[in-house]
Image: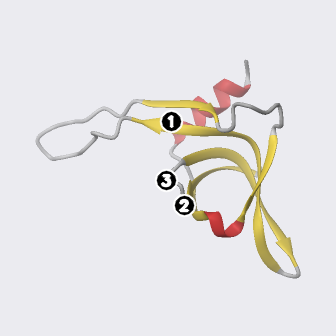
Amino acid sequence: MSIQLFLLKSGEYIIADGKELISNQKPVGYLLDNPEKVTFNSSVFFSEEEESEVKISLSPWIILTTDTKITIPFDWVVTVVEPIESIKKIYNNGKDN
C-alpha cells in the first residue's frame, strides 16, 4: 500500500494508505486504510502578483465508525494521485498520535 489522494464523485478528497482491489484481472475497488477527509479553503487562487496560502485540515472520513479499513467501489473514484509532501506529512503526523 502507499499513501494516495483520492478524488471521489462526491467531490470529497480522501487521503489514505490505499490499495487497488482486483477481481478476474479487473479493478473493482480500493481498500483505504485510515482514510481521512481533506478540507481546504476554497477561495484559493494563484497569480504572479500575489502569493496565496492554502489552509488544509484532515478529519476522519466516516466519523461514525471504528473501522480503520474501508472499501470503495472503483466507479466512485474520479482519480487517484500522489499527494504533495506537506499533506503526506500532516497525514503521517496524525497517525503517530
Question: Residue drawn at (62%, 44%), measured in percent from left and top?
Answer: 15
Question: Residue drawn at (59%, 39%), measured in percent from left and top?
Answer: 37
Q: Which mark is residue 9?
A: 2
Marks 3 and 1: which is nearer the front?
3
Question: Residue drawn at (56%, 31%), measured in percent from left and top?
Answer: 58
Residue 23 position in % (x across, y down)? 87, 75
The amino acid marked with disc number 1 is Ser
Gap in Å between the C-alphas at discs 3 and 2?
5 Å
Within 10 Å of the Cα at label 2, are there few (<14), some (14-19), or many (20+) other Cα atoms? few
Badge 2 element: loop
Q: Which residue is mark 1?
A: 86
The amino acid marked with disc number 2 is Lys
Badge 3 element: loop
Residue 25 position in % (x across, y down)? 84, 81
Q: Which mark is residue 42?
A: none
The relative height of residue 18 versus residue 85 in the rendered view (above or below) is below
Residue 39 position in % (x across, y down)? 48, 37
Within 10 Å of the Cα at label 3, are there few (<14), some (14-19), or many (20+) other Cα atoms? few
Which of disc 1 and disc 2 is earlier in sequence?
A: 2
